[in-house]
Amino acid sequence: MKFFLITLIIILLVITSCSSNPTPDTKDQIKNTSNLVNNTNQGGLKMKIISNNFKHNQDIPNKFTCQGQDIRPHLKWTDIPKETKSFAISVIDPDAPMGDFIHWLIYNIPVSITELDEGIEIPEKSIEVTNDFGKKEYGGPCPPSGKHRYFFKVYALDSENINDVNKDNFLQKIQGHTIDSIEIIGLYQKNK
């Protein structure tokens, strides 16, 4: 009988310790692991971007500026999150005398498009937004003085169609749907 009581007490202690709540350290570990999973792309990849026309932090050729043909350079992005439904792109010069100068804004780019050849044509269903040149088409670098940086940023979005986007709310609307983003920076100084 004594053996039976000791065995029963041991079993109850084991059951009680197994069913107790996790310690605060364990809860924090679970929470941190959950955040890691939510903050990474499917497969743990980070988007990548390249251009056949310039390298990151290198000069943009004249062809793609106001001193050339003023057309958009080639862009290609890879390692897209699986949940991506569309893309958006912004081209902004943060070194302009009055602050950020918008050269190009485009959104609702179909998820099947992961490369844009140099030129002016845009993918079907994509929508361009009026830029700081007062036009919707890409406007190339044209700094008044000195060498400026041009941030070509691609956003992977969780929505196929975003509505009512304009120059003033573009970044807010796009960032509200951004899963991941990547940028390449080109440099340009006018030839004299």
Image (spheres, grey):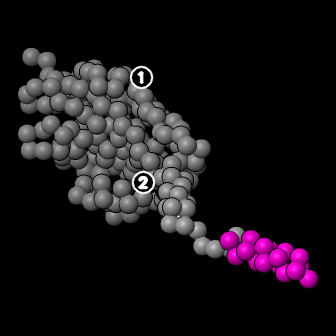
Residue placed farthest to the right in the image? Answer: 1
Q: Nearer the viewer, residue 161 or 186?
A: 186
Viewer-nearest of discs 1 and 2? 2
Q: Give the magenta-colored segment's residue range.
A: 1-17
Q: Which kind of residue does numbered mark 2 sit on?
A: Thr
Kindly check if marks 1 and 2 are in contact, taking CB atoms under 8 A apart as contact.
no
Residue 88 placement, left or right of 83: left
Residue reaching furthest to the front:
2
Indicate whether residue 180 is drawn in magenta.
no
| Residue 137 percent coordinates (x, y) | 29, 42
Look at the magenta stretch and give its main secondary structure: helix
Q: Which mark is residue 189?
A: none
Residue plotted at (35% across, 22% down): 55
Relative depth, front residue between 180 and 93: 180
State the image coordinates of residue 109 (x, y, percent, origin top left): 45, 48
Q: Earlier in the sequence, mark 1 or mark 2?
A: 1
Dot 2, crowdedness within 10 Å: few (<14), some or many (≥20)? some
Q: Amino acid at mark 1?
A: Asn
Q: Is residue 134 above or below residue 8?
A: above
- Residue drawn 36% across and 37% down? 183
Query: Any mark on residue 178, and which?
Result: 2
Q: Is residue 112 left or right of residue 20?
A: left
Residue named by callout 1: 52
SS for dot 2: strand
Image coords of residue 44 (percent x, y) = 55, 43
Residue name at image x 29 percent, y 25 percent: 57
Q: Compare residues 16 and 24 and report the one nearer the observer.
A: 16
Is 2 drawn above or below residue 182 in the view shown?
below
